[in-house]
Amino acid sequence: MTLILHWLLALGIALMLGLGLWMVRLDYYHPLYQALPALHRDLGLLLAPLLLFRLLWRGFNARPELAGARWEKGLARFVQAMLLVVPILMVVSGYLVSTADGRPVSVLGLFEVPAPRLEIERLEDKAGAVHAWLGYLLLGLIGLHVAGALKHHFRDRDTTLTAMLGMKGDIR
Amino acid sequence: MIRMSLVLLFLLTALPVLAVDYEIDTKGAHAFIEFRIKHLGYSWLLGRFNRFEGDFSYDAKHPERNRVKVVIDVASLDSNHAVRDKHLRSARFFDVKQYPEAQFVSTGWQDLGNGKAKLTGELTLRGITKPVTIDVSDVGHGPDPWGGYRRGFEGTTTLKLSDWKMKEAKILGPAAEEIIVYLSIEGIRK
């Protein structure tokens, strides 16, 4: 279950980052100018329950013990926690941008998530700036996370990465 | 003594009417700066600037002495769609971080009779100053019910986005090269 959650979220987050970076560069007359942001909002709101479930899952399950020096453990714990916190904050800030003028945001045309009544002036600018910076932060965190995984595999020659890929070894 | 006072009073009332200074009533929101631009060439998109202030001086006898000055808080633009406003405030268009204020300072007033006039002035937008001409019509003037005196005008002018080097304005397409600005201004006598 932890593995499925991990890779589902990894796929979702990678898609969201790619979509986000791509869609803001589109020309107004590009055929996907409307479709990509709509898809980005749909996926973002669908990721929200998954992220919250992952947070609960983390709370109710024992975490594997970490290998390495104290600073390595500390860094790994910090990056792993941030990899959950930052996407959650990105969903919140993205939702605030989409609903800043009080309009609800639709999910796949099936249902609508209502707008909060915050009455914050220029919320779209503030939440938008937070959303963008969190995005760059998340790219950096993913970089660190991937570097850690590769270090386990190639330098420590342990089974952390293979276990995460569901091949062999336990998640220690 | 009484005669002298009467003479003085006569002299005072007989003096030519001097320019009267008005403060634009933005506090009571009896002044509006609206813009309209074509969307894809198929419809008009309306927006406005919610915050600005200014004053004008009106001289009925010597209209060429009329003066107007308005300072606009560009970030207060409102097109009734938060993400669009966000785009318009960005460096692609108004670049409000770099240029938070726009300013109009009049340079001339040509009376055309029948309550019409041509107001010329310099508009500073995105740090670029260009001359503009506003077609002005008199709307009305007189005492208000609360002890003040008010005077109102409306005006229209057409601006070209390219004149203010809105870098990405061209992405809006050929139908959106011009923006029509409509002004409704009410001043309270100072």
Image (tube, rainbow, N blue to C red):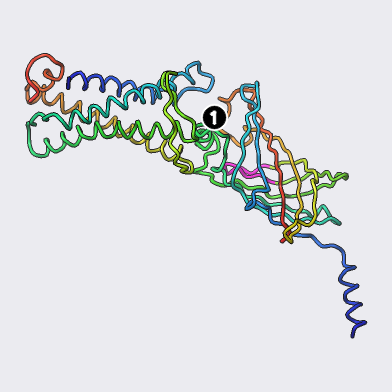
Position of residue B129 measured from the top left corner of the image (x, y, whole percent): 64, 44
Is residue A85 rendered to the left or right of residue B120?
Answer: left
Residue A32's place in the image compared with B77, above or below, is above
Image quarter of residue A172:
top left
Residue sitting at the far bottom:
B1
Image quarter of residue B156:
top right
Image quarter of residue B88:
top right
Is residue A88 rendered to the left or right of residue B152?
Answer: left
A50 or A97, which lies in front? A50
Position of residue A77 measured from the top left corner of the image (x, y, whole percent): 16, 35
The residue segment tinted magenta is B122-130
Is residue A140 rendered to the left or right of residue A152?
Answer: right
Q: Badge 1, how many Cα within 10 Å: few under 14, some, many 20+?
A: some
Residue sitting at the far top:
A167
B172 or B81, which lies in front? B81
Is residue B37 rendered to the left or right of residue A163?
Answer: right
Amino acid type of disc 1? Answer: Glu
Residue B13's place in the image compared with A46, above or below, is below
Q: Which element carries disc 1, helix, strand or loop?
A: loop
Q: Which residue is mark 1?
A: B168
